Image (tube, rainbow, N blue to C red):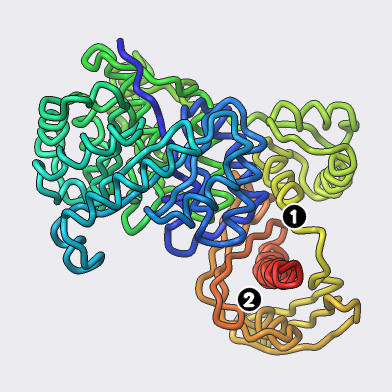
Amino acid sequence: MSQIKIFDTTLRDGEQSPGVNLNKLEKLEIAKQLERYGVDRMEAGFPASSQGDFQAVKAIADTIKGTSVTGLARTVKEDVDIAWEALKGADEPRVHLFLATSPIHMTYKLKQTPEEVMNTAVNMVAYAKQKFPQVQFSPEDASRSDWNFLAQIIERVIDAGATVINMPDTVGYTTPKEYGEMFRFIKETVPNIDRVDLSCHCHNDLGMAVANSIAAVENGATQVEGTINGIGERAGNASLEEVGVALKIRSDYYPYHTNLKLNETKRTSDLVAKLTGMYVQANKAVIGRNAFAHEAGIHQDGVLKNKETYEIITPEMVGVNANTLFLGKHSGRHAFKDKVKELGVDLPDEKVKEAFVKFKQLTDHKKEVTDDDIFTMLMEIQTDIASVNKYQLEMFQVQYGTANIPTATVRLKTPEGNAIETACTGKGSVEALYKTLDALIAEELRLVDYQLNSVGGGKDALAESHVQLEVNGKKVNGRGAAQDVIEASAAAFLNGVNRYIVGQNQAQTKEAVK
Ligand code: KIV
Ligand code: ZN
């Protein structure tokens, strides 16, 4: 059994999903969970792309020690220098350089000849190698590139110091057989290829990202790149949990294994879904809500007689347990603290106290508090952007009835500390609420997307809301949880606005420091 390294790019390619924007604390939480999941390498972001991403990559590189941390960079010195500043605190600093090699990208996007592309790639890999012990190079759009040109550029960048060569199917165009053949060709043609890890990176535009990745592995790839829940640009990337479970379940056929702790799959998937607002479809392989549900009578009958008749993956293998009923009204601080530890959330003492107060409030209204409820609450506190002045909800009231005009009254505390209040009507409760918030908040606001989900089942389940807003023309996401759907909706809206304000504060601080 040979080991396949898992390279997670949820925090970089995944974060490029439309509508996803994670803050530093959220990225750090996901990074810690990826480490627990056992990924070998994680791409924490693209440090030169923004100050926020730089700070997030730096925090992850300084914190995560069990997984090698990398950052993306274009083949320009400034990107490599910025990546070094972000990653130099990592145990094994690693940079990921990319440059397109397909005729269509070189001609229209780069407007460069193949020789120019070759020189830039070689020079920049050599430059990066002066700083980084580990340098990954990706010929972008490799699957639509000329194989002979690919072989030449790969040989040259390995001589210049690359330690990993990643051949991406950037636009999700390839097929398993074709992609496998490309890996075999490179393996057989490039004389120094055994000095590096050979990596695959597949997009899912034709729904073949996982199949293509496994075909690459069968033909010499030793690293698979992908994301949790398959999130990413357009139709997303190869879903890492599917790759890990496929190799495990079919280990009778595939002679490969990964370091993934598969029983952390569910928790990893849930965390990514919760923080990105990209929930997985019920019928998603491995992790969807229906993946272990057997509806048809004939299936149920078979499963009762012998689970293996219809079940090839056990829920336990991927960490799907019956949602254990957890602490209740009479549970004490000690038991609560133990639960926080068990859920793997690292909170300082004062935040545990804050969480305990919220937990007690919840038990006043909810008899059966589940692990999911607790985890949702902890994430609210853990990723709260508490250090800046922001809008705070002091009070709200929404009147709704089939015979009334829905009306909302809201009192807010502004970032300057003033209490402001107004009321508006709308066609429904949420519209009335959002119109009122809009009237009170000084920024220019537009609601782009709104989602409401329940955390677990039951009539008294917590509600979780995600919104996407345009604040002064800039897209931001917001997230909020509460027992009431309207309160969760208000929290998500304000969270979005406050994230914008935090971003503005950071930008101003940066200006002032310059
Ligand atoms: O899809 C792609 O080509 C990429 C590169 C940056 C590796 O994400
Ligand atoms: Zn990609």
* Residue ID for mark 1: 384
Q: Which one is closest to the eye, mark 1 or mark 2? A: 1
- Secondary element under disc 1, as helix, strand or loop, is loop
Q: Quadrant of the C terminus?
A: bottom right
**N-term mark: 1 or 2:** 1
Q: Amino acid at mark 2?
A: Val
* Residue ID for mark 2: 430
User: Is residue 236 left or right of 267 when viewed as pictured?
Assistant: left
Query: Which residue lies at the image location 73% right of the left edge and 83% below the top edge?
Result: 441
Q: Is residue 494 visible?
A: no
Q: Quadrant of the N terminus?
A: top left
Front in this rendered view, residue 501 or 290 = 501
256 shown above or below 15: above
Whole-percent x, y for residue 467 in the image: 57, 67
Front in this rendered view, residue 289 or 357 = 357
For the residue carrying disc 1, how many other residues have a C-alpha within 10 Å: few (<14), some (14-19), or many (20+)? some
Marks 1/2: CA distance? 23 Å
15 shown above or below 32: below
